[in-house]
Image (spheres, grey):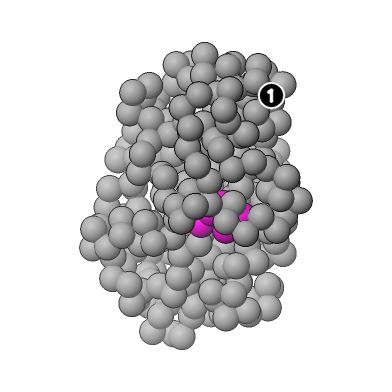
Amino acid sequence: MDILDGIAPVADRYDGFVLDLWGVVHDGKKPYPGVPGALAELKARGKAVVFLTNAPRRSWFVQGMLDRMGLDRALYDGIMSSGEVSWRHLKHRKEPWFAKLGRRCVHIGPERDLSVVEDGAAEIVEDVAQADFLLNTGPDPARGPHSPDPYRPALEACAKAGLPMLCVNPDRAVMVGGERLICAGALADIYLELGGAVMEIGKPDPAVYDPVLELLGNPPRHRVLAIGDTPHTDLAGAQAAGMDALWALTGLAADAHGEDPDPARLAAVAHEEGVRPIAAVRALRW
């Protein structure tokens, strides 16, 4: 697999860019070196840039996080999150799975994720017996972000009650400030083992790319490049949506393969995952 030092060699092939956030644009605390400069180069060339993240929060919340990191809003055209898509489904109830879903839910996750149910999209209850579904946005402060095991009793109770799970972040893990933390997808795996029903919203589902294309101005899909650090979600999702993908060797990729990965090993992993990125890139830089 070819490994590029930056995105300059491929930038002119595309009109739109779909960028993952955690592990590509920033490390959970601050932008990676070179990212603002790369985004500025894309915008100077008239390219459309949209962030697509599996964050279990609405887009306005994610934008506030980027503001606090000092990332200029002029460097991108929009944000779409799995939390935003989930909120739209819960609010409008047009899709069959959501149309038949009740409105009361038990929540596993931190309080900061509750933008997903704002404006009456759903009601949080404490008692499993009163709930219609389980809202899973990931680890909470009480049980911690390092292992899914502390969540097993709550998951078992919800599975016993027959609650379907809405998983608002299909990621299994994320790197934050160099530390590997679990995400909602890790809890969804346990729920599936318990025989529970799970609906995951976010990458790699190709449906989440439709609102992204709207934010990009609806360019042809073959003129859109997605950049992500995770084959299972970022690369697979782009491929399923008919877009090219570039594998960023930061975030989870850096954790798995180190700072100087073997191109043959990367190619083997991509083959195992069933994805065909056009190349890998050492970082989102020009």
In the drawing, does residue 255 fall left or right of residue 16?
left
Against 213, residue 137 (above or below) is above
Question: Which residue ends up furthest to the right in the rendered image?
Answer: 96
Could you tell me which residue is drawn at 49 percent across and 52 percent down? 120
> Looking at the image, which is closer to me, 189 or 105?
105
Label 1 neighbourhood size at 10 Å, few (<14), some (14-19), many (20+)?
some
> Looking at the image, which is closer to me, 182 or 61?
61
Residue 82 visible, this orientation: no
**Badge 1 element:** loop
Magenta part of the protein: which range?
Answer: 84-89
> Looking at the image, which is closer to me, 5 or 271?
271
Could you tell me which residue is drawn at 31 percent across and 60 percent down? 64
**88 inside magenta stretch:** yes
**159 inside magenta stretch:** no
Q: Position of residue 58 (x, y in %)?
A: 45, 56
Q: Which residue is mark 1?
A: 162
Against 46, residue 56 (above or below) is above
Q: Position of residue 121 (x, y in %)?
A: 53, 51
- Where, quadrant-wise, is the C terminus in this rendering? bottom left
In the drawing, does residue 282 fall left or right of residue 40?
right
In the drawing, does residue 4 fall left or right of residue 176?
right
Residue type marked 1: Gly
Q: Main secondary structure of the magenta part?
A: helix
